Image: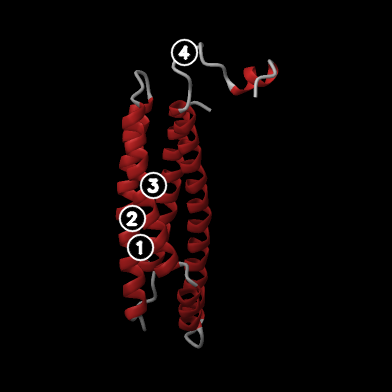
Amino acid sequence: MAIDTAFGDLSLKMDRLRDVLLGLRLAVVEDKPLQGAGALLDRLGEAVLDLEEWLGESLEAAALGQRAAQYPRDLEASRDALATCQERFQRFQRQLSSEVTSFERIGDLASLAHGRGREWTSWVASVRGSIDQCQGATHDVSEALFQCWQEIAERAGAPASNKTPSLERTRSHGIQ
């Protein structure tokens, strides 16, 4: 895969995650039942807003990396942008796992629905579905980040000219 293609794939997967996160925000902030909403929902809403901010910063860095990966390629700028993207995305992942998808938080959501009627049960099911989608999209972004790092590593380790034998050529000539 070409490095600019890897960055393009990363941007697409991050865009999908942003869309899924928007769905989660709408469910948590806009669609919550009016009666009985408390501190848990406020904290969850704030966490989702933070997630949107960190994902936005990560997306900006991915776009910079993608531009730098195009001709004429600036591998150093691509690497720096990818490092920023990775750092912001890791912050996103920590927030997601500690404040949104943790076992404790999912348990708190389930407790909210208990005994509050069909509206709350339906709302919690909707939020949990959005959380599941976020986890899947987050995994896809992690894989795309890895692919970008792999492409950069291959470029950084590529020989400057054809005078340096490749690993495959040295093995085919019996050189260890």
76 or 112: which is nearer to us? 76
Q: Please name the residue that numbered disc 2 is placed on.
A: 52
* Disc nearest the viewer among 2 and 4: 4
The answer for how far apart the CA atoms under marks 4 and 1 are is: 49 Å
* Residues at circles 1 and 2 in contact by the CB criterion of under 8 Å: yes
* Distance CA(mark 2)–CA(mark 4): 44 Å
Is 128 drawn above or below residue 6 in the view shown?
below
Query: Under tag 3, what secondary structure?
Result: helix
Q: Is residue 60 visible?
A: yes
Residue 143: percent from left, percent from top: 52, 45
- How many numbered marks have been drawn onto this rendered protein structure? 4
Question: Which-is-in-front pick, marks 1 and 3?
Answer: 3
The residue singled out by tag 4 in the image is 161
Residue of label 3? 86
Q: Which residue is mark 1?
A: 48
- In the rendered structure, the answer to whether residue 136 lies left or right of residue 93 reads right
Residue drawn at 50 percent across, 51 percent down: 137
Type of residue at label 1? Answer: Val
Residue 32 shown left or right of residue 157 in the figure = left
**Mark nearer the viewer, 2 or 3:** 3
Identified at 52% across, 16% down, the residue is: 164
Q: Position of residue 113 (x, y in %)?
A: 49, 81
Sequence-wise, the earlier of marks 2 and 4 is: 2
Q: Is residue 99 left or right of residue 49?
A: right
Q: Residues within 10 Å of mark 2 (few under 14, many from 20)?
A: some
Colour scheme of the rendered structure: secondary structure
Location of the C terminus (image quadrant):
top right
Give the mark nearest the N terminus, 4 or 3. 3
Instruction: Name the image quarter holding residue 165.
Output: top right
Label 4 to label 3, Cα distance in Å?
Answer: 31 Å
